[in-house]
Image: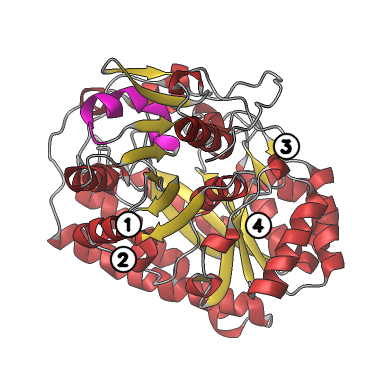
């Protein structure tokens, strides 16, 4: 059976503004096991190609697959686009099977199957084994109800099968790198790039995180095997930069150090970027030289808030002092720090934004990424926010870069003004400008200049969009009335019990 992996176009600014694209790791991770099992697999990256809806449909018709599998890392904000694509495809190809996977459909499977007739099946949770088992069952004509980790219609009624077992050995499943031309993907100002995962999950309990329950438990790949894979990607495919998609690649000091040392031994000039927690940087103060030697050039740190009460309310498990110390340590070792800071966790006043700016100045990160709080129904934070007013009802804009919830004490235009002024003040302050223009480390200087160029384009785009684009609601529905009740009881989606692996079905 021919399978087409379809990466839909995404409306988020992060997908449109840099003019660079990273490979769709989730789809490639599903594709590798399918290829190894004998399926004919192709990738259509409509996001990278910037394809319109008619162009996507025409390409699918021309490729004539038996099954289309869709998914996107920007899961919730891409959902409307996915639905439009599926409806257009089914209108022309009624016999086509459409499978939808990712974080959003994992939690909203019953609503999607009730509301979108064009979508036949949903993969819930990790996709590598589940998508393979589903395709093997389809190929062999076996009952789909026996496939763990999917949702389907039984007599027209949405039904979820048993939860899929959590993948305990991530190295059992390979990424299908042969599905892409590596020359098509770049990041960091034209550097050939890939996305990888060293680990999945996170042991921390931040109540707004939409990823923790999806992966259920923290696990990591074999450090040496991953280092060898990255070295192979550099030597054979010309990869220059590796973007870690992990929530917490540094979760185990022992495993992370083993990876760094193995990559250093490979002697490949790779640049590594990713996200981690400030606490792990402080913990690893004595081995940060290994970070830099292995190629780590930037780590994103989730600062989220300066307010101790807010940090406690969202169960961040961090302190402002630790955040500031981590930024200082990264700078001492030639590693760029990017601080993410979230606006809107609680009802704020003008003075709160001013204090946020002053605290960010004291933190002195190299780069800053301001975000708007964007609640997901499957997180515990949703219940805390469900009585707040929604002022943005286009869920394609629920991408962390658009206001979606009202702040009762501050009108939306003034929240936006504070947001943009804080960004401008942080990126245009003398210390930041000096690092852009005169930093002695060429790699750091390049990182600062590249991000500044992208940030300048995004900043002006967002200002123009706010004033010239669709207006925000003055009075909107409550979050609960708009999206529905909390789905927090579904947060953890994988079965963590040990089970024997299913026997493969021969593909014909």
- In reply to whether residue 340 is colored magenta, the answer given is no
Dots 3 and 1: beta carbons under 8 Å? Answer: no
Callout 2: 10 Å neighbours few (<14), some, many (20+)?
A: some
Residue 334 percent coordinates (x, y): 71, 69
SS assignment at label 2: loop
Residue 48 percent coordinates (x, y): 39, 65
Residue denoted by label 4: 327
Dots 1 and 2: beta carbons under 8 Å? Answer: yes
In this view, the residue in front, 417 or 80, is: 80
In this view, the residue in front, 302 or 196, is: 196
SS assignment at label 4: helix
In this view, the residue in front, 195 or 165, is: 165
Left or right for 423, reference 38: left
Numbered tag placed on residue 50 in the rendering: 2
Which-is-in-front pick, marks 2 and 4? 2
Residue 136 percent coordinates (x, y): 52, 34
Label 3 to label 1: alpha-carbon separation: 31 Å
Residue denoted by label 3: 169
- Please name the residue shown 34% across and 65% down the image: 16
Q: Which residues are magenta?
A: 103-118
- 1 or 2: tag closer to the N-terminus: 1
Left or right for 150, reference 192: left
Label 2 to label 3: alpha-carbon separation: 35 Å
Label 4 to label 3: alpha-carbon separation: 33 Å
């Amino acid at each position: 059976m021919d399978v087409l992996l379809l990466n839909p176009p995404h409306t988020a600014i992060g997908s449109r503004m840099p003019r660079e694209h990273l490979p769709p790791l989730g789809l490639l991770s599903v594709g590798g096991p399918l290829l190894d099992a004998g399926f004919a697999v192709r990738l259509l990256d409509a996001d990278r190609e910037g394809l319109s809806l008619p162009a996507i449909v025409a390409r699918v018709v021309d490729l004539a697959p038996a099954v289309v599998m869709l998914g996107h890392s920007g899961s919730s904000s891409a959902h409307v686009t996915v639905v439009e694509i599926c409806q257009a495809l089914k209108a022309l190809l009624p016999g086509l099977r459409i499978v939808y996977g990712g974080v959003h459909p994992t939690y909203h499977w019953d609503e999607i199957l009730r509301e979108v007739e064009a979508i036949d099946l949903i993969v819930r949770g990790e996709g590598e084994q589940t998508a393979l088992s589903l395709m093997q069952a389809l190929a062999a004509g076996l009952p789909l109800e026996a496939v763990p980790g999917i949702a389907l219609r039984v007599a027209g009624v949405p039904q979820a099968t048993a939860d899929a077992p959590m993948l305990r050995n991530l190295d059992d499943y390979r990424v299908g790198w042969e599905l892409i031309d590596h020359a098509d993907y770049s990041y960091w100002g034209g550097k050939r790039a890939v996305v990888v995962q060293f680990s999945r999950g996170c042991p921390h309990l931040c109540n707004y995180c939409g990823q923790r329950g999806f992966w259920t438990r923290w696990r990591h790949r074999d450090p040496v095997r991953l280092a060898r894979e990255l070295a192979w990607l550099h030597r054979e495919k010309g990869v220059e930069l590796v973007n870690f998609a992990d929530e917490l690649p540094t979760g185990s000091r022992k495993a992370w150090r083993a990876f760094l040392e193995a990559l250093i031994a490979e002697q490949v000039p790779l640049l590594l970027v990713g996200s981690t927690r400030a606490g792990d940087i402080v913990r690893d103060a004595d081995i940060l030289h290994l970070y830099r030697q292995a190629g780590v050039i930037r780590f994103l740190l989730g600062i989220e808030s300066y307010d101790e009460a807010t940090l406690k309310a969202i169960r961040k498990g961090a302190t402002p002092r630790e955040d500031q110390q981590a930024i200082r340590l990264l700078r001492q070792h030639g590693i760029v720090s990017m601080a993410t800071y979230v606006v809107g966790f609680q009802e704020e006043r003008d003075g709160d934004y001013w204090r946020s700016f002053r605290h960010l100045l004291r933190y002195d990160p190299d780069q800053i990424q301001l975000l708007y709080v964007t609640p997901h129904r499957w997180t515990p934070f949703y219940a805390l926010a469900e009585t707040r007013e929604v002022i943005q009802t286009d869920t394609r804009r629920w991408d962390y870069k658009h206001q979606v919830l009202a702040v009762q004490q501050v009108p939306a235009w003034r929240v936006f003004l504070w947001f943009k002024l804080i960004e401008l003040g942080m990126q245009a302050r003398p210390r930041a400008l000096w690092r852009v223009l005169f930093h002695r480390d060429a790699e750091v200087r390049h990182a600062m200049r590249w991000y500044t160029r992208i940030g300048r384009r995004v900043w002006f785009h967002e200002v123009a969009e706010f004033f010239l684009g669709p207006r925000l609601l003055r009075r909107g529905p409550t979050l609960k009335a708009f999206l529905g009740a909390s789905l927090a009881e579904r947060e953890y989606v994988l079965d963590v019990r040990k089970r024997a692996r299913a026997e493969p079905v021969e593909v014909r």
